[in-house]
Image (tube, coloured by chain):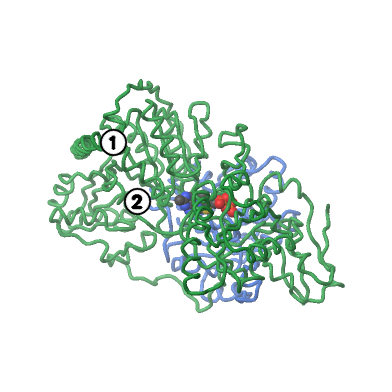
Amino acid sequence: MQKAILSGDEAVARAAWEAGVSVAAAYPGTPSTEILENITTYKDDIYCTWANNEKIATEIAIGASIGGMRALAAMKHVGMNVASDPIFSAAYTGVNGGLVIVSADDPGCHSSQNEQDNRLYAPHAKIGMLEPSDSQECKDFTKAAFELSERFDLIMMIRMTTRVCHSKSIVQLDQRENIQAKTYVSDPQKYAMLPVNARKRHIAVEANLEALKAYSYSSDINKTEINDTSIGIITSGISYMHAKEAFGDSASYLKLGITYPLSDRLIIEFAQKMKKIYVIEEGEGYLEEAVKALGIDCVGKQLLGSQGELNAQKVRIAFGLQAAGEGYATDKTAPPRPPVLCAGCPHRGFYHAMGKRKDKILAVGDIGCYSLGVNAPYNGFDIAICMGSGFSIPIGLSKALEMQNDTRKVFGILGDSTFFHSGFNSMVDAIHLGANVCLCVLDNSITAMTGHQENAGTQKNLMGYEVPAIDILQMIYSTGIDQTCVKIVDPIDQKAMGEAIDQALETDGPFVIVTKRPCALLKEVIKANKGAHCTVDPDKCVGCKACMKIACPAMAFEGKKANITDEASCTACGLCMQMCKFDAISKAGI
Amino acid sequence: MNLLFTGVGGQGTILTTKILSEALVHMGYDVKMSEIHGMSQRGGTVNTQLKYGTKIYAPNIGEAEADIIVAFEKAEALRALPFLKKGGSIVMDEREIYSMPVLIGQAEYPHDADEILSKCVEHVSVVPASRIAEELGNIKVQNICLLGALVKLLELQDINWDALIAQSVPPRMAEINQIAFKKGYDLISAKKELT
Ligand SMILES: Cc1ncc(C[n+]2csc(CCOP(=O)(O)OP(=O)(O)O)c2C)c(N)n1
């Protein structure tokens, strides 16, 4: 049998192919992005696509499932909030072709705005849930999920976490199963969720969950490992790995693979054999509460807490197997190294121009590379909550300021992908309501933060085919906004950028700025810029540090002079040149 | 064996870990490799972790659990110190990369990080991998030079590294990487003879 070292994401992609999936959709989001990216390897067999947001991705998958094909939708944990509307109601309809939703959670907030534990969604939404703990299980469980989805007429969720998604381990590969398409038969009572049908389907989904629960008792997706019976550990997903590494064979384990519905019988029978029960889980006390609800005494969150990512050492320390602080320490600390806007990043020009008018502006950011503008020296905005909110929070915020006679203008900031995700909906309301806000779309022609995924504004789709690019400007004009209140600028051009902001400040009512310049890391851009960089003439440089204010990582101040220290990453965007009053910086290598 | 690789976005820590895990799987070990990317791509700290042995459970390394820390940058070695197990080793490049807070004068760079670490940790090897890479004409091969040093330290020579490197990098980069590997490998033996 063929073996490969795969990440959890790669293994899910492989499983989708082996399980005979025909349609897969997602909106990118770390740590889930690589699932769809890897499914493109099988694009001859699987139609795969990015959607504008997670709700749409899920609905594409629901449509394919109802149409009789196996379908998958993948998203990061917060994406499931966006997708929850269709999930909660499609849970009632059940499936035709198997339907699997992959949720990739991010304990420790490695690249997210919160640490929400999506296991809690499963009972709430009434969908089945499997939790793999390594790449082999990612493959096995995803394949099993499709089977279970069809057998029990349920949506199944694969719940992963960053360490499962982004860790690589050895996986056995198999061939693609030949799955017959299921014919679509018109059945509004099952698929049209009007009250009269929904009431009946609610009964059906509860019965289907009961059936899955009964199956769960004897399923080999759950594993019982009996060693010493003085300690019994109930765990799931990656937490099993941490528990096993910490306790080894000195404890027994109930490793739950099916974590919704939970098999009460399995838990009770395991607990009866043990003197003491520990529940070891990352995030919320999801399993612990279920165990306690069965009247079983156990210890878990009280020792582990619910914040951050677990590791074996934390488990050892929490359960008293090892004292903390057996390593090394010094007094000296390393300086912080936050991620920064890249050299040549168009967002830098935007934030620099905004910074010059700071006292007149209160800015709301959003989630994307431009989120990095929150850091010094830009301090570009104060507020960032979730995708799309960059254009709707300003509506309420501007009202609140107005009521208190605060004359600052509220600016909203988001990128092209976020605009398509949900920002446009917010913009429509802002313009419709005549809100006194300036909405800025930082269009860098790609979904950059998550690693350059195509979006509705790009001319290629995920599979690499030519598609019509949707024009952001036409969308904005379609709202009927006075066209003189829409400014399109190159954000590196500080004169134009500044004028646009000034005009927005002078306007009472909605104003829109679209900054247009592609991400500096796009292949075409790198190619076009090849060899080009800026250079500082040390004779002309007076060491005034004006150019250092833009905080470009390609520049440093050395020996009382500014210098381009990283010519390879400098793109000769020329923003630093505009800072210099002494003409000391010029372009070279062009 | 628990290995923690730390560096700055763009230094090639992930490729290094990938090549090493490939080799370890060939040698019959159970291997788990864990990387965190996302925000960290944009010039932030990048950590990748590799664990190997007969059977590996958890993919990530907690505090005081690493046998070896391989630091591609000086200040990052200091930052990673809490992860080192008592008696473990640090292999660190002397290269300094200033973070934005340092560049804009909000934080100070610890130029003496190597000395501080050498004082409190018994086994520290400071290697000029980036200087060697620069002399070879491409700073990017710093990572493979460090890999060479690490392979020597771990005594993993029973693998055709030249072939493995060649299949892991673009063809035109194979030779320079192989040379960098050899130079890194020799760094450690030379050092051992000195002491
Ligand atoms: C609901 C939700 N889905 C996905 C993500 C992951 N995510 C963070 S930023 C981002 C892309 C932003 O792209 P864009 O708006 O074009 O800005 P850029 O990074 O290109 O500047 C995505 C998909 C998220 N944080 N929240």
Label 1 crowd bin: few (<14), some (14–19), many (20+), radius 10 Å: few
Direction from residue A440 to residue A330 in the image, left or right: left
- Secondary element at tag 1: loop
The circle on residue A194 is 1
Q: Which chain is green?
A: A
Query: Residue B13 location in percent, x, y?
Result: 58, 54
Residue B35 visible somewhere in the drawing: no
Chain identifier of the residue bearing label 2 in the image: A
Marks 2/1 in contact by CB < 8 Å: the verdict is: no
| Amino acid on which disc 2 is placed | Asn
Label 1: chain?
Answer: A
Q: Nearer the viewer, residue A89 or A541?
A: A89
Query: Which chain comes out blue in the rendered image?
Result: B
Which residue is drawn at the image coordinates 53% and 44% (left, top)? Answer: B23
Mark closest to the chain's N terminus, 2 or 1 = 2
- The Cα–Cα distance between marks 2 and 1, rounded to whole angstroms, is 27 Å
Q: Residue at x 78, y 76 (%)?
A: A543
Displayed quadrant of residue A484: bottom right
Quarter containing the N terminus of chain A: top left
- Outermost right residue: A539
The image position of residue A100, as x and y in percent, is 37, 37
In the picture as drawn, the residue positioned furthest to the bottom comes out as A331
> Is residue A465 at all visible to an observer of this figure?
yes
Which residue is label 2 attached to? A118
Q: Amino acid under label 1?
A: Leu
